[in-house]
Image (cartoon, rainbow, N blue to C red):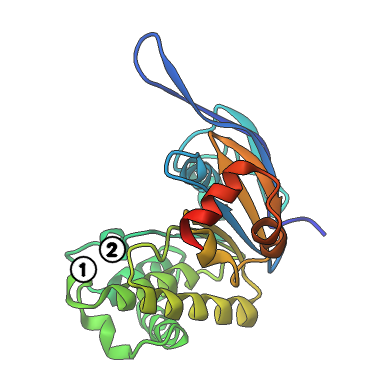
Amino acid sequence: MVPVLQVEHLRKVFPVDDRRTLLAVDDVSFSVAAGEKVAIIGESGSGKTTIARMVARLTDVTAGRIFLQGTDITQLTGRKLREHYRHMQLVFQSPADSFDPRRTLGDGIAEGLRNFGWQKEAAWQEMERLLGLCGLEAGIAAHYPHEVSGGQCQRAAIARALALRPKLLLLDEATSALDVTVQADILALLARLQRELSLAYLFICHDIALVQDFCDRVLVMHEGRIVEEGTPDEVIGAPQQAYTQRLIDSVL
């Protein structure tokens, strides 16, 4: 079966000044199967968020290829890229910042549906269904991002991400701005949605303990490279790299 996401020999070099460059991602390859939850963990600056931004095509690649459901999207632009975006959606670290502060949450969620041809009334009804799916009352649609809690806003952001029925969600530190109790609630929601909708997740995270019971597979990044991978039990229970052990020791 073709993976939902296939990344091959991904590389990203950023210019620092006229003479210097920064190698942020160095020859990274991995895949995410349908319905699989894969975490990329590592310290700040390890390259994990740069990978997420390249996969989402928010940052151009220096080298390598990205396949979404078997289609090479590495160089796609404009309408062709937009057609494939519906299969992959992002959930960001700061949900309030990902919404337009001048528009209600309901408008923000329904907008994606309208952009793909849904009529106004149908889009609004679907938006309310998505809110309910994510554990929110329909009335929250009338609120602005700053009027709700961080957990409620992240649930609304997840509802928005589900609007086009994607196959893959990119979750970039999607729980790190929330307190521990709310983190657990959001992870429980994501686990339920994954089971019910057969979603695949690429979960970008710096906290190895957070993904221990949530993900099927863990990729450990250090200085732009994947230095270890396996199931959470393998990576956490019997780490092969000293760097992975330091990550574990810092949180467990």
Name the front one of labels 2 and 1.
2
Question: Residue placed at 71% from the left, 47% from the top?
Answer: 240
Residue 250: x and y, percent?
Answer: 47, 54
Q: CA distance from mark 2 to mark 1?
A: 8 Å
Residue count near mark 1 (Cα–Cα under 10 Å), binned few <14, some 14–19, many ≥20: few
Which residue bears the numbered disc 1? 103
Where, quadrant-wise, is the N terminus in this rendering?
bottom right
Q: Is residue 142 above or below residue 71?
A: below
Residue 143: x and y, percent?
Answer: 21, 79
Question: Residue placed at 60% from the left, 48% from the top?
Answer: 244
- Residue closer to the observer: 71 or 121: 71
Element type at mark 2: loop
Residue 8: x and y, percent?
Answer: 69, 38
Which residue bears the numbered disc 2? 99
- Residue closer to the observer: 234 or 106: 234
Which residue is most to the right? Answer: 1
Amino acid type shown at disc 1:
Arg
Q: Is any atom of residue 7 visible in this view?
A: no
Question: Residue placed at 17% from the left, 65% from the top?
Answer: 102
Residue count near mark 2 (Cα–Cα under 10 Å), binned few <14, some 14–19, many ≥20: many
Q: Is residue 74 above or below residue 98?
A: above
Amino acid type shown at disc 2:
Phe
Question: Residue placed at 68% from the left, 52% from the top?
Answer: 239
Element type at mark 1: loop
Q: Label 1 near label 2: C-beta < 8 Å?
A: yes
Q: Is residue 124 above or below residue 69?
A: below
Which residue is most to the top? Answer: 19
Q: Quadrant of residue 243?
A: top right
